[in-house]
Amino acid sequence: MALSESRNTPSSVTHSPRNDKSDYYFLNGEQLIFYSSKTRVIDGEQITALPATNIWDDLLSNNLHKEGAVSFKNGKKPEALLKRILEYATDVGDVVLDSFLGSGTTAAVAHKMGRKWIGVELGDHCKTHCLPRLKRIINGKDLDGISKAVNWQGGGGFRYFKLAESLIKEDSWGNAVINPKFDAELLAEAVCKVEGFRYAPSDVHFWMQGQATETDYIYVTTQSLSRAQLEVISQEVGPERSLQICCGAFRVQKDAFENLTLKKIPQEVLDRCEWNHDDYSLEVENLPAKPKPKGQQELVLEGGEDA
């Protein structure tokens, strides 16, 4: 109808409205195409744009070597590339995981775009590249990459953890044993983590090494405990509290004491491990933030502390 009308009135523009779609406009029997339909506001600028395809050849790597102030030959990705991916696949506040962090580009872009992120890297460049790069971002000194496009001014923080050695080793006979590099304190802390206790050694009772509730405690030792030793511990624990003991061996029945739960290490640790699983689910928890003194700036500290 509109097309025929346009042919009959060649000097007039004919309008054909459409529900939920762009309207048609005709002049002299031909459809009018408006240039504004080919433009989009990207990074604050009105530019000509087309729907994205499977091939992105518009993301140039100019000055890529300067991004993040780190050099990573043949491995660094442009921040603009990660920005586009995260815009398509995530929202502000989502968690982004990069298990091969490389030079830290994914974490850098996610941080600037208001995403939470987790980065894993086994190479030395985790410390030589990623750590200094992310420090510069937090301090507002990173002006490269997408910083201008997202108006990055600095801020935020992160935690830096270093993976410990394996708690379990094999001896010359192929038996599972506790890694000799773990001293008594480190062993107790590791087992507390595995068993779901908070490591909190007491200055009063040697057997109070960790706590799950107000009345539930854990004691970790590589010793073989006799009945006499367990009787003394049981009396100190008393009827109002319970104690889980993870030890090298014990010379009584497991249920010999009502207030004691007896387990052997390293078998207890091995039973907690997930072996031969085809699928591992990732559980991301919000770790409690360490309180900062008033007026103190956020800094990055190694060894699992706050940044």
Image (tube, rainbow, N blue to C red):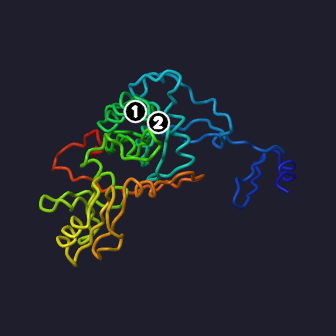
Few, some or many C-alpha atoms within 10 Å of disc 2 (few <14, some 14-19, many ≥20)?
A: many
Residue 117 located left or right of residue 185: right
Q: Nearer the viewer, residue 37 or 180?
A: 180
Using the image, tell me which numbered label, if any, was put on residue 183: none
Q: Tag 2: residue type?
A: Leu
Are the residues tagged 1 and 2 within 8 Å (C-beta)? yes
Decide: is 296 above or below 23.
above
Q: At 17% from the left edge and 70% from the top edge, which residue is drawn?
A: 236
Q: Tag 1: residue type?
A: Cys
Mark 1 sits on what residue?
A: 126
Residue 7 located left or right of residue 69: right
Q: At 36% from the left edge and 63% from the top edge, which residue is drawn?
A: 263
Does label 1 or label 2 sit earlier along the sequence? 2
Q: Furthest residue to the left?
A: 204
Where is residue 188 shown, x and y percent of the image? Answer: 28, 53
Where is residue 79 shown, x and y percent of the image? Answer: 49, 33
Where is residue 142 shown, x and y percent of the image? Answer: 36, 31
> In the rendered image, which quarter contains the C terminus?
top left
Using the image, tell me which numbered label, if any, was put on residue 101: 2
